[in-house]
Amino acid sequence: TETIGGKRCDTDLFYHGTGSMATSLILGHTGEFKIVKAKVGRMLGDGIYLADKASKSAQYIGDDGYSRHSISGSLMIVEASLGNTVAKRSNVKNCDSVFAGRKQGLRNNEWCVHNPKAVIPRYLVQMKLD
């Protein structure tokens, strides 16, 4: 994983869920992440949204945004370097990623990583949920 600010901080595996149409936009021909303005999931600003639970990311695999029934899309397992992380519910300048979890009123942890080079897709799982 590429370093952020000269340091490898909090590098770990995370999940990212997206619709099947968005997968090709996000990964393009290179297989590297690109930040695409999303219809849903922008609570922490623009960036790549990651979770430490597959079930959280699987909620976003539909092409029509957040859903839990009759959807198909991609669940990615990625390696990410979070860098300088701040815990907020809004986009914050001078940080590499924004975190929200239970203290911010959420059931699950999630991160928004601003630098697409800090996130490397390792596995791509095509899913269909009925």
Image (cartoon, rainbow, N blue to C red):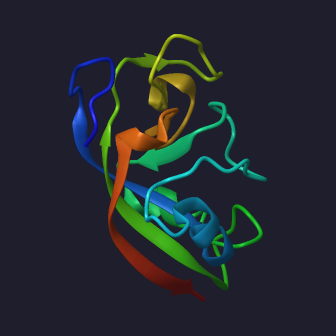
Q: Residue 18: x percent and y percent?
A: 58, 65
Quarter containing the N terminus: top left
> Which quadrant of the view contains residue 77?
bottom left
* Residue depicted at 50% across the width and 42% down the height: 107
Farthest residue in the top direction?
94
Against 6, residue 112 (above or below) is below
- The single residue placed furthest to the front in the displayed view is 30
Q: Quadrant of residue 32?
A: bottom left
List x then y, in percent, for residue 65. 73, 63
Horizontal side of 104 relative to 78 (left or right) equals right
Q: How many marks?
A: 0
**Is 48 placed above or below 127 here?**
above
Locate the C terminus by quadrant: bottom right
61 and 48: which is toward the camera: 48
- Which residue is more in the foreground, 124 or 67? 124
Answer with left or right where residue 24 lies relative to residue 5.
Answer: right
Please report the residue visible at 37 percent of the width from the left and 18 percent of the height from the top.
84
Residue in the picture at 42% in, 48% down: 51
Q: Position of residue 109 (x, y in %)?
A: 43, 39
Q: Please indicate whether residue 42 sits to the left or right of residue 12 in the image.
A: right
Residue located at (67% from left, 75% from top): 21
Taking 130 as reference, is 25 above or below it? above
x, y percentage for residue 36?
A: 67, 51
Say left or right for 103 vs 77: right
